[in-house]
């Protein structure tokens, strides 16, 4: 059977090369608080000499419907909600004709009183023709807290938030693949530093030539080791300064599970937790009931972050006896990156020989951050480094 092409097929879109700037669609569930983050992105772009038009679909819908009480637009009948959205997107399609660089802040799905329903129209997305799709994610506790405070009339459990996050990622990826083809969809975590993550967003938009990196490092095993945590943080900051980074530490929900398990062993029934700059109280049963969901999403999300990267760079510190601190998670990340045909680099700080599970998957193994930096500079991946690269002496 011979291959045939049809006027409406999407294959030509998949072959279009990445370009600097252009049109970006940003999705993320309600409660991620995307707008202040995207305002930071616009500011970063301006500092680099690029003007970016930020269009917030939610704000535009409220402006289109002044009779709707703030915070209640999702309670409208679906017919009116859809009509409002289409009217707003028609206005967006007119505006973008005058602006080369545009970010549209919207959603892919909603999980509300009406159940699960889409938050976009395929025909209008085709007309908008985005160059890039980015799904923004954040810790489940932070999203849950904002939803509880800002939409207290609609109950969202931790389970609801986790499921909605998965649905939002999947729907955005499907939309991006249909319209743009593989490789122009990215998951990005807000993280604690909006500025650092905004730099990665800016680079995805305006510097697509820059290498995309997944920083790999032990997390759970070093929670009570402040000096080692400082080493790892310096490593993460160094990579963020020179690459587009998809940092797994920017979504850190495992720590909440660990604290919940410890609280249960002490006979507690609730957990007091710091999020969004304030203390909140969770029922332990609710946290522990979603432990499998959190672990499963960590596993799937970290693998997705690796797959959307060009390389993985793993930092393996040492314990006080000089033995390497390498978790099964880090080893699995290295293996997955290798099997995904990514460049795999390991900074091995111990005098102990690395195992074949490290050496057989690594493109190159370094003994220090400074040695890795020299290599990446020679390869043209990094410029001048301003940070102090001195590390603790090997044990």
Image (cartoon, rainbow, N blue to C red):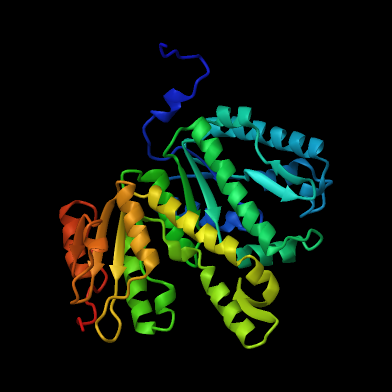
Q: Which residue occupies 63% across, 65% down?
A: 290
Which of 273/238 is in front? 273
Q: Which residue occupies 63% across, 62% down?
A: 143
Which of 46/293 is in front? 293
- Please identify the quarter of the rendering in which residue 32 is found: bottom right
Which of 260/74 is in front? 260
Image position of 25 with respect to 195: above or below: above
Q: Which residue occupies 45% across, 33% down?
A: 181
Residue lying farthest to the bottom in this orientation:
266
Q: Position of residue 391 (x, y in %)?
A: 23, 78
State left or right for residue 280 relative to residue 3: right
Q: Position of residue 188 (x, y in %)?
A: 48, 54
Q: Locate the C terminus by quadrant.
A: bottom left
Q: Locate the N terminus by quadrant.
A: top left
Residue 258 can be seen in this image:
yes
State left or right for residue 374 relative to residue 241: left
State left or right for residue 320 relative to residue 92: left
State left or right for residue 140 relative to residue 14: right
Q: Position of residue 375 (x, y in %)?
A: 17, 59
Image position of 90 with respect to 386: above or below: above
- Please identify the quarter of the rendering in which residue 224 is found: bottom left
Residue 243 can be seen in this image:
no
Q: Which residue occupies 44% across, 24% down?
A: 11
Image position of 95 with respect to 374: above or below: above
């Amino acid at each position: 059977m011979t291959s045939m092409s049809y006027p409406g097929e999407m294959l030509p879109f998949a072959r279009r090369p990445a370009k600097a700037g252009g049109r970006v669609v940003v999705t993320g569930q309600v409660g991620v608080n995307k707008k202040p983050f995207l305002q930071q992105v616009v500011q970063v772009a301006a500092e680099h000499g690029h003007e970016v038009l930020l269009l917030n679909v939610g704000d535009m819908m409220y402006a289109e419907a002044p009779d709707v009480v703030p915070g209640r637009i999702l309670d409208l009948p679906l017919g009116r909600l859809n009509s409002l959205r289409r009217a707003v997107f028609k206005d967006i399609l007119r505006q973008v004709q005058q602006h080369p660089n545009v970010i549209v802040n919207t959603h892919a799905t909603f999980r509300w009183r009406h159940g699960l329903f889409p938050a976009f129209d395929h025909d209008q997305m085709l007309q908008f023709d985005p160059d890039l799709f980015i799904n923004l994610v954040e810790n489940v506790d932070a999203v849950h807290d904002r939803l509880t405070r800002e939409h207290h009339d609609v109950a969202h459990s931790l389970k609801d938030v986790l499921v909605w996050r998965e649905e939002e990622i999947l729907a955005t990826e499907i939309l991006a693949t249909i319209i743009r083809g593989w490789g122009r969809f990215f998951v990005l975590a807000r993280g604690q530093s909006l500025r650092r993550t905004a730099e990665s967003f800016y680079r995805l938009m305006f510097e697509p030539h820059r290498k995309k990196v997944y920083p790999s490092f032990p997390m759970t095993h070093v929670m009570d080791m402040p000096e080692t945590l400082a080493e790892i943080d310096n490593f993460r900051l160094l990579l963020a300064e020179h690459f587009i980074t998809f940092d797994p530490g920017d979504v850190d929900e495992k720590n909440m599970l660990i604290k919940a398990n410890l609280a249960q062993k002490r006979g507690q029934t609730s957990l007091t937790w710091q999020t969004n700059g304030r203390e909140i109280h969770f029922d332990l049963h609710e946290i522990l009931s979603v432990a499998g969901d959190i672990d499963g999403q960590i596993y799937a999300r970290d693998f997705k972050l690796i797959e959307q990267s060009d390389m993985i760079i793993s930092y393996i510190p040492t314990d006080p006896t000089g033995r390497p601190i390498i978790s099964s998670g880090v080893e699995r990340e290295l293996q997955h990156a290798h099997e995904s045909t990514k460049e795999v680099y390991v900074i091995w700080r111990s005098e102990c020989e690395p195992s074949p599970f490290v050496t057989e998957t690594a493109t190159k193994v370094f003994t220090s951050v400074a040695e890795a930096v020299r290599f990446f500079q020679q390869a043209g991946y990094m410029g001048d480094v301003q940070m102090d690269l001195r590390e603790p002496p090997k044990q």
